[in-house]
Amino acid sequence: MDLIFKKDELDLAVKLILKQRSCKVIRIDGPMGAGKTTLISALCKHLCIEETISSPSFSLVNNYKGENGPVYHFDFYRLENSNEALDFGVEEYFESGSLCFLEWAEKIEQHLPLKYDHFKLKVVDFETRKLTLLKA
């Protein structure tokens, strides 16, 4: 399933992800600058998270207070090897039952849970993105 949308139609992508998701772990892939953090920020706002949403590039994970418990936002871009994710307990986060949004999850592929939703964000042009559901 694909959705092509303009930057000002981000809500369409949010609704698609929330409608298609089948579990609590949501992986969003895409190149640098595609808008992964922007999309996750819009998802969090839709989930009534009032905190400022930012990329956890340096901390690896940001924790937000959601209406139904914590929401975790991961960015694995800076990992040197996948075992670094194990060092900070990534598996416990995945098993917590809390919503987890993942950026650069290809860096920890072997540590991902068996069940997760997988979306890909592609740059079509400066204003346009394509969101593809790869696995639900």
Image: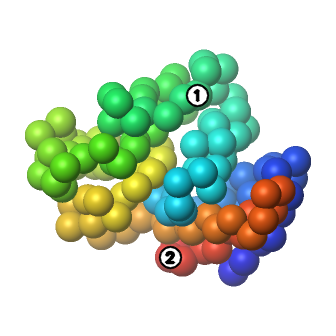
Which corner quadrant of the image does residue 41 belong to? top right
Residue at image coords 66%, 60%: 17
Q: Residue furthest top?
A: 51
Residue 25 in view (yes/no): no
Give residue 38's position: percent from left, percent from top.
Answer: 65, 42
Amino acid at pointer 2: Lys
User: Does 110 appear above or below 43?
Assistant: below
Tell me the SS state at disc 1: loop
How far apart in space, not on screen, are marks 2 and 1 (Cα)? 25 Å
Residue that carries the numbered disc 1 in the rendered image: 53
Horizontal relation, residue 124 to residue 58: left or right = right
Tell me the SS state at disc 2: strand
Q: Mark 2 touching mark 1, by CB under 8 A?
A: no
Give residue 135's mark. Answer: 2
How many residues crowd around disc 2 within 10 Å: few (fewer than 14), some, or many (20 or more)? some
- Marked residue nearer the N-terminal end (2 or 1): 1
Which corner quadrant of the image does residue 78 belong to? top left
Residue at image coords 60%, 51%: 33
